[in-house]
Image (tube, helix red, strand yellow):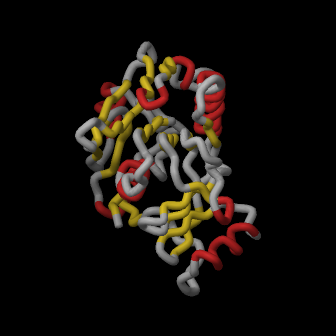
Amino acid sequence: MQKVRTPITIDGKSRFTVEEYIAFENSSIEKHEFYQGEIFPLNEGTDMEVEDPEAAYHKRLMTEEEYLAFEDASEQKHEYFQGEVFAMAGASDQHNEIFTNLFGELTFRLKSKKCRPYGSDKRLKIPQNRLYTYPDISIYCNTNTPFEAANSSQEPTVLIEILSESTKDYDRGRKFKFYRDIGTLKEYILIDSESISVENFRLNSSNHWELEEFKSIEQNLVIATLDIVIPLSEIYAHTELR
């Protein structure tokens, strides 16, 4: 369980300069905190309690077989973890734009390689911790078909998640912990949908995860495992972040 504070909105605006914050604060009877362009009330009453992610099926725990039957009949995607089922968050237009850009680049650059990219309709199963989930993009490089029993795949080489405000803590924290149980995984990439920011966690020769960050639109995302380079300008094309 985590504390999450909600930034305030003034006349439909949620991002402010330092000067705008100071002017607002000087005219306010309450105190506020300013962080990276957002203004947060300091009173405890504005905090909300949230979980990773919200459970969608509360009556009882499900078996894996029950979950798969439930999922096949559902119009919405759900994540499954050790008997619990969780509704997955919808995607924003900006999230979808980034996905379209990145998936197109991966498809083109991997065309002559043995690795294949798949979108968020491909379900991933991690037998070691009994997690079923749908990564935004998964890349499989084994020579065998990536499809396993119950239309769930198990051996990705690279996983990519596009971060949103509601999922970024989960994707960076518990979900990455679950993903690290995958023996074939070599790189885990997080694409921020609200700022120019790409984080690439890469497994090194000592079997430790190293982080490489990309913060400028002029930089190139290096996916060493696939031996490809993708400009951030292509990833964030047609978004408000260029």
Q: Residue at x 63, y 59 (%)?
A: 148
Give the quarter of the image for residue 89.
bottom right
Q: Is residue 18 left or right of residue 89?
A: left
From the top left corner, tell me how far across and down residue 147 is, in percent. 65, 53
Image height of 231 relative to 77, above or below: above
Front-most of residues 146 and 77: 146
Q: Residue at x 33, y 39 (%)?
A: 203
Instruction: State whether residue 6 appears in this view.
Output: no
Residue closest to the far top: 218
Q: Is residue 79 left or right of residue 206?
A: right
Q: Residue at x 29, y 50 (%)?
A: 30
From the top left corner, tell me how far across and down residue 231 is, in percent. 50, 18
From the top left corner, tell me how far across and down residue 239 is, in percent. 59, 26
Residue closest to the far bottom: 60
From the top left corner, tell me how far across and down residue 71 is, in percent. 68, 68
Front-most of residues 59 and 24: 59
Image height of 69 relative to 154, above or below: below
> Which image quarter holds the N terminus?
bottom left
Residue closest to the far left: 206
Give the quarter of the image for residue 32.
top left
Image height of 67 relative to 40, above or below: below
Q: Residue at x 41, y 46 (%)?
A: 7
Image height of 19 relative to 65, above or below: above
Front-most of residues 27 and 116: 116
Give the quarter of the image for residue 225.
top left
Instruction: State whether residue 18 appears in this view.
Output: yes
Q: Is residue 189 left or right of residue 39?
A: right
> How many numbered discs, if any?
0
